[in-house]
Image (tube, rainbow, N blue to C red):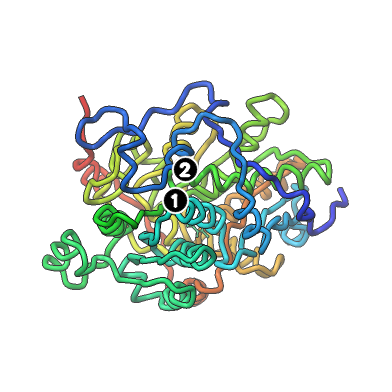
Amino acid sequence: MNTPTKILLDESEMPTRWYNVVPDLPVPPPPQLHPGTLQPAQPEDFGPLFPQALIEQEMSTERYIDIPGEVLDVYRLWRPSPLFRAHRLEKILDTPARIYYKYEGVSPAGSHKPNTAVPQVYYNAREGIKKLTTETGAGQWGSSLAFACAQFGLECEVWQVAASYRAKPYRRTMMEVWGGRVHPSPSELTEFGRELLKQDPDHPGSLGIAISEAVSQAVASEDTRYALGSVLNHVLLHQTIIGEEALLQLAKVGETPDVLVGCTGGGSNFGGLAFPFLREKLAGRMNPTIRCVEPTACPTLTKGEFRYDFGDTAGLTPLMKMHTLGHSFIPEPIHAGGLRYHGMAPLVSHVYDLGLVEAIAIPQRECFAGALQFARSEGIVPAPEPTHAIAAAVREALACRESGEEKVILTALCGHGHLDLASYDQYLHGDMQDLELSDEAIAEAMKDVPVLA
Ligand SMILES: *Cc1c(COP(=O)(O)O)cnc(C)c1O
């Protein structure tokens, strides 16, 4: 089919509502639990962490939530984002498949994360909050939040995983350009951080530890709240603008996907792309296979257990039922920093448990091989995280070459890799290794997961 390379929407066609998948699911998702009482968490339990509007969205059973005008105004700086038909990638793969990718690297921070950073900061600003704290790994989320805070005049304080703070100075600079303050985590600023630094002054840190530090600082101050860049229901909700736009764009060229693949770290770009298509599937209007793709070094869905666990290492967050490798698990330093999280979004975990989506794990060298094919044909250098989605799309396209099937494959290219070139350098010079997580390492980390009666 002769579709154009770039399928665009006018600003006036941009969706004005986010989609909440919860009311359409055949079984409601399990509630989050208060860590002390183990009873379902109540809205007031989240008060010290999040503004009221986001707590309501976190627990909402409304199918659609209007996007505030002030948020739409900021979205228009880069949205609607383009949907590309990967004609050139298809050609070098010699596949009859038709591959489409939704490109989120056009945002100021270079990834999908501003889609939720902007509304999160907006709702905090509206409720009089002056400062937000957060954690970041490679810096994608921290820079997105710093950008959004600059838009609405809030202070932004970021705990960055120490290993990344040292290895990836440029995203730290981006955060500072947008006015953020950045600390390596573990830090001397929190009790938990000081304790860890006493054990190991060169502690590499982890996302779970950085979350503990950012949360503890937020709850200690009246005009400060905390912001999370993935995992939670309201984050996935905000990201559904990706899938809603993609639906409109595919409709323009008369296509429906047969296979949808997305990379999953905490699950937000995947949920954002997939949930509007899951709605269509559950309503019987299309029937795509929907597949999560994760790294073999952090195989949360494919090897983790589906049970209640904490979102952070110190155990400060509510307990969430999710696929988890254990909140004390510290993943190997793979290049896809955004996919190194011990848990998976409760909503993604739930739809996986219900059998509505599939999951696979791919080692990083296959991912970078796919990324090079992609960069040399389509031109864009992908961030290390979506190389997993690309590798999965390549696998599908090659299977179509064998079978002769003309499947329509859809994925999200959720960020560009301009600040991740050191990873490409390692791959190109043969210094990259595949990391498989042993069953023993998983069993060890699972020991710390709370056992509920
Ligand atoms: C943060 C990040 C991810 C992982 O987070 P999800 O919530 O799983 O989307 C993936 N890709 C990029 C580019 C990121 O910045």
Instruction: Please tell me how crowded label 1 is: few (under 14), some (14-19), or many (20+) other residues with Cα within 10 Å.
Output: few
Q: Which residue is mark 1?
A: 127
| Mark number, residue 53 | 2
Going by the numbered disc 1, the residue's amino acid type is Glu
| Residue type beneath disc 2 | Ala
Q: Are marks 2 and 1 in contact (CB under 8 Å)?
A: yes
Between marks 2 and 1, how big is the CA–CA gap? 9 Å
Q: Nearer the viewer, residue 342 or 399?
A: 342
Residue 34 placement (x, y as % from top left): 27, 35
For discs 2 and 1, the disc positioned in front in the rendered view: 1
Relative horizontal placement of residue 49, taking residue 430 as reference (left or right) = left
Task: Name the mark on residue 308.
Answer: none
- Residue 430 in view: no
Give whichever of discs 2 and 1 has the lower sequence position.
2
Toward which corner of the image does residue 18 lie, by quadrant? top right
Residue appearing at x 73%, y 28% in the figure:
285
